[in-house]
Image (spheres, rainbow, N blue to C red):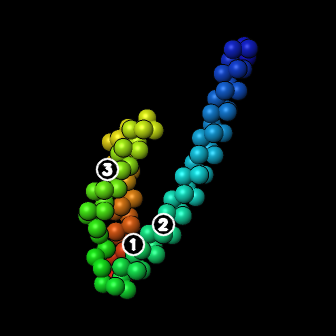
Amino acid sequence: MTDDTARAAAVLKEHRASIDRLDAILVYTLGERFKHTQAVGRLKAEHALPPSDPAREATQIARLTDLAQQADLDPEFAKKFLNFIIQEVIHHHEQHQS
């Protein structure tokens, strides 16, 4: 292995370690987020509120699109990701209402 290849392997290892840490942060952050959305779902069910709030969802998508742009993240990816999360939350809310 050349010195250049060894340096590349070391840098690759560092990047992968950072990716692994960030993946853990994402998972724990999503877990915390879903704890709150579950509480919202129970509250909505107790008060006969609809599981979906299109105005809030639109506001959140716009806010996260802006954040994505600031973070140099593809806004379309951010929208798809948030839409996926929103659909999962609505599904959970619907389960609380049945």
| Residue at left offset 40%, top offset 80% | 43
Q: Amino acid at mark 2?
A: Phe
Task: Give me the C-alpha separation between circle 3 and circle 2.
Answer: 20 Å
- Residue picked out by circle 2: 34
- Residue at the far left: name it: 54
Task: Give me the C-alpha separation between circle 1 and circle 2.
Answer: 9 Å
Task: Give me the C-alpha separation between circle 3 and circle 1.
Answer: 23 Å
- Residue 75, placed above or below residue 24: above
| Sequence order check, earlier mark of 1 and 2 | 2
Foreground mark, 3 or 1, reads: 3
Say which quadrant the C terminus sits in: bottom left
* Res 92 label: 1
21 vs 32, left or right, is: right
How many dots with numbers? 3
Q: Residues within 10 Å of mark 3 (few under 14, many from 20)?
A: some
Q: Amino acid at mark 1?
A: His
Residue 96: percent from the left, percent from the top?
A: 38, 80
Foreground mark, 1 or 2, reads: 2
- Residue picked out by circle 3: 62
| Residue at left offset 42%, top offset 80% | 42
- Residue 10, placed above or below residue 98: above
SS at mark 2 in the image: helix
